[in-house]
Amino acid sequence: MSYINTIADLEAQTYGTGATGSISNQLLKAAGTVSGIHVAHDGAINPAGVTTGIAGNLYNKVYGQKVWSMLNRECNALSVIAKRPYSSSGWRILSKRAGGGSGNSLDIAAASNTALNDALYGADSLRADRIGGVPENASLDSNTDGLISIAPEYDTLFTSPKIIAHQFSFSELSMEMASIDDGIGDIRAQLREDMGKHHAEVQNSMLVMPLEFYSPTTAYATASGIDRGYTSLFKIISSKAEIVELADNSGGNLVDDAADQAIDHLYGKQRSDTIGYMDSEVSFGAGYTSAEARQLTLTVINDMVRRLRVAGGSPKVILTGYDTLQVLSDLLQAQERFMDRKEIVPTVNGVRGVKGAEVGFRVSTYYDIPLIPVAAMPSTGNNSSLISDMLFLDTDHLWLSVMKPTQYFEDGISNGNPFGVGSLGNKALYRTMGEMGCSYFKGQGKITNLL
């Protein structure tokens, strides 16, 4: 008498499957020399001694139709950036005040003994006694009375849409075979899903592409290659001082800042000391040598927040890596200050707070600024112990300008048109057209070179 306590007991009783996968069948052997048809479920497809024949060919594992992804394909940077229609090729910039320079605040100096002249009223540094106060019945066009025609300065920036596309194909035979045997069913549906995620993941990586990869001294950067993708946030949120330091540091010359290289060029302009409005707030410490990397402290972060607000920016989100977020959490949680939770939702208009809604997700905040971790976030510098950089984004002035949103195209034999794709199968692709835009560089910030 036998007892059945487990599924293995039931299989052994019914099919005669032994623990070693032998071919004896206790039920069928009573008729003589008949052997059972069996292969142990947790054994090899062809157990020892059975390479062909009945037992080796009538059983196979069934894996199911669902394909599970074991890869992290998050797209947080792409999700939090505001999306706007591509409505113009460029935009006009107020680059300098009518008087008082182009700094973060009006530049006013003490009155001097310099004789009054017209140039004093539109100067980069204004006299404190000549900034707009005029006497009664003042004469026009009179530097004595302080009424001289002045005007601000303007500049223009332009950008071209980038085409991001990924093609894939499947044969007629593979489509048919996937629907029978141990196939996954509709192979086209599965590939559409996986390739769609890849299409988004690649766009996310373009947005956090390290600035060093744009350098022609690396194997990644070619004039017709890397610039075909979206302009990276790391290139937008930079400054002439950072590029010079990356080029001149003694730790290996991370970039080449020669005048004819793309590392300096952005939106039809070249970053220079005379175009100050294109410089973002960048904190990299004393320099980019290995010895000049510094510890992440609250002072470093608070200084960046202060600088951005003095510059007129209003950071809406902080992008960083999981390692930097952990270091920041260790700094804050130990003292139980500033760390809070906030509910946000990424939308086509960027990150916005949601009050009283049952959607979105909980994230950490710093001074009410959401902290969003990005797995692909790089670190800038030479030290091997660096943690991820931090990007402070004012998404009111930073956006992805979309000319054509992501579209899916497919044609081929399934649509009755094998001649269109030139093969007995189908071809498909995802395509998105757009480019990053920024209308206020000083409102964007970056902290790099962190330990």
Image (cartoon, grey):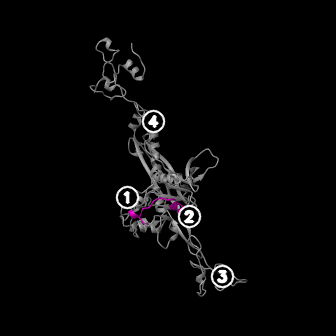
How much space separates mark 4 and mark 2, taking CA atoms?
50 Å
Check disc 4 and report the residue beneath it. Answer: 66
Asked whether disc 1 touches disc 4, contact meaning CB atoms under 8 Å apart, the reply is: no
Q: Is residue 168 visible?
A: yes
Compared with residue 115, is residue 421 higher up or lower down, i.e. above or below? above
Q: Are the residues flagged by discs 2 and 1 in contact, CB closer than 8 Å?
A: no
Q: Quadrant of residue 115?
A: bottom right
- SS assignment at label 1: loop
Kindly identify which residue carries mark 3: 147
Indicate the secondary structure of the residue bearing disc 4: loop
**Quarter of the rendering occupied by the C terminus:** bottom left
Residue 279: x %, y % from top left: 50, 67
Instruction: Identify which residue, 435 or 147, lies in the foreground.
Output: 147
Look at mark 1 in the image and give the residue it sits on: 220
The circle drawn on residue 274 is none
Dot 2 alpha-carbon crowd within 10 angstroms: few under 14, some 14 to 19, many 20 or more: few
Viewer-closest of 366 and 438: 366
Nearer to the camera, 286 or 192: 286
Report how far apart the C-alphas of labels 3 and 2 lie in the structure: 36 Å
Q: Identity of the amino acid at label 4?
A: Lys
Q: Specify the amino acid type for callout 3.
A: Leu
Q: Earlier in the sequence, mark 4 or mark 2?
A: 4
* Residue bounds of the magenta highlight: 287-305
**Sequence-earlier tag: 1 or 4:** 4
| Residue wearing tag 2 | 306
| Disc 4/disc 3 C-alpha distance (Å) | 77 Å
Residue 8, given in percent of the width and then of the height, sits at 39, 23
Q: Helix, strand, or loop for circle 2? A: helix
